């Protein structure tokens, strides 16, 4: 039932909003450059890697040593707008159709995090990751990694079709209100370094 729902909703959204997506993609190319799509390997069900698609929201500006500048220096006002309304997430509907992720589930984070999870935290990978999830409607990047993972594990243990509908309903209001986009003091979210330490820049 969940897979059928994922396919139906994703296909409908892609067809209905494709003209808007094309316009936004052209704006990304003009304002941020190429490539328009950001492609990164993430862990899926049981940690199996796949490539996640997003619209790029940062420039590729580098320092004199050829290293990418910090996130806050590469995140332009246009990129902030894309993130504010989660427009950069639109290409993930392709991931849903491919079966990499679901519409609802724990967010797919970085491959580097896999060995850092506690046994309990790793349970978040017992289901497919999602575009939105229980942690996203209960704080998103404004809460700690530990709180986020507890919410993910709670979802895994209590998942149901009706819970998914509740999460989707709440997501609409959270996106409209632009809540929890950034961790206080950071452009995005600090990297997860293990349960007792979070230092540096990362992805949410």
Image (cartoon, rainbow, N blue to C red):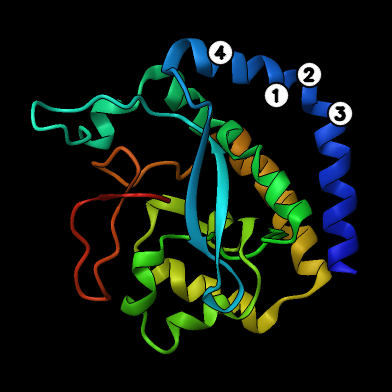
Give residue 155's quadrant in the image: bottom right
Tell me the distance, in whole angstroms, between the alpha carbons under discs 4 and 1.
10 Å
Numbered circle sitting on residue 27: 4
Residue at image location 34% in from the left, 62% down from the top: 144
Query: Residue 187: image x %, image y %?
Result: 30, 37
**Looking at the image, do the residues carrying marks 1 and 2 touch, with CB atoms under 8 Å apart?**
yes
Tell me the distance, in whole angstroms, between the alpha carbons under discs 2 and 3.
8 Å
Numbered circle sitting on residue 16: 3
Residue at image location 74% in from the left, 61% down from the top: 99
Please identify the quadrant where the N terminus is shown: bottom right
Residue density around tag 2, few if under 14, some if 14–19, many if 20 or more, within 10 Å:
few
Tell me the distance, in whole angstroms, between the alpha carbons under discs 1 and 2.
5 Å
Numbered circle sitting on residue 21: 1
Residue at image location 70% in from the left, 58% down from the top: 167
**Looking at the image, do the residues carrying marks 4 and 2 touch, with CB atoms under 8 Å apart?**
no
Left or right: residue 7 versus residue 142 is right
Q: What element does badge 3 sit on?
A: helix
> Which residue carries the number 2 mark?
19
Tell me the distance, in whole angstroms, between the alpha carbons under discs 4 and 2.
13 Å
Tell me the distance, in whole angstroms, between the alpha carbons under discs 3 and 4.
19 Å
Is residue 10 placed above or below 31 in the rendered structure?
Answer: below
Query: Residue 32: image x %, image y %?
Result: 43, 18
């Amino acid at each position: 039932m969940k897979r059928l729902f994922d396919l139906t909703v994703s296909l409908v959204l892609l067809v209905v909003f494709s003209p808007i997506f094309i316009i936004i993609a052209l704006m990304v190319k003009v304002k941020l450059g190429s490539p328009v799509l950001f492609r990164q390997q993430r862990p899926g069900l049981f940690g199996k890697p796949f490539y996640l698609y997003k619209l790029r929201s940062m420039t590729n500006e580098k320092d004199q040593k050829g290293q990418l500048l910090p996130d806050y220096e590469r995140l332009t006002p246009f990129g902030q707008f894309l993130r504010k309304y989660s427009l950069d997430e639109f290409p993930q509907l392709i991931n849903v159709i491919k079966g990499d992720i679901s519409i609802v589930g724990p967010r797919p984070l970085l491959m580097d995090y896999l060995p850092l999870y506690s046994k309990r935290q790793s349970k978040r990978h017992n289901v497919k990751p999602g575009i939105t999830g229980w942690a996203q409607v209960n704080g998103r990047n404004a809460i700690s990694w530990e709180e986020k993972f507890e919410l993910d594990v709670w979802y895994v243990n209590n998942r149901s079709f009706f819970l998914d509908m509740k999460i989707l309903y709440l997501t609409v209001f959270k996106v409209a209100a632009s809540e929890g986009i950034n961790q206080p003091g950071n452009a995005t979210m600090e990297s997860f370094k293990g349960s007792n330490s979070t230092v540096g820049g990362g992805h949410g």
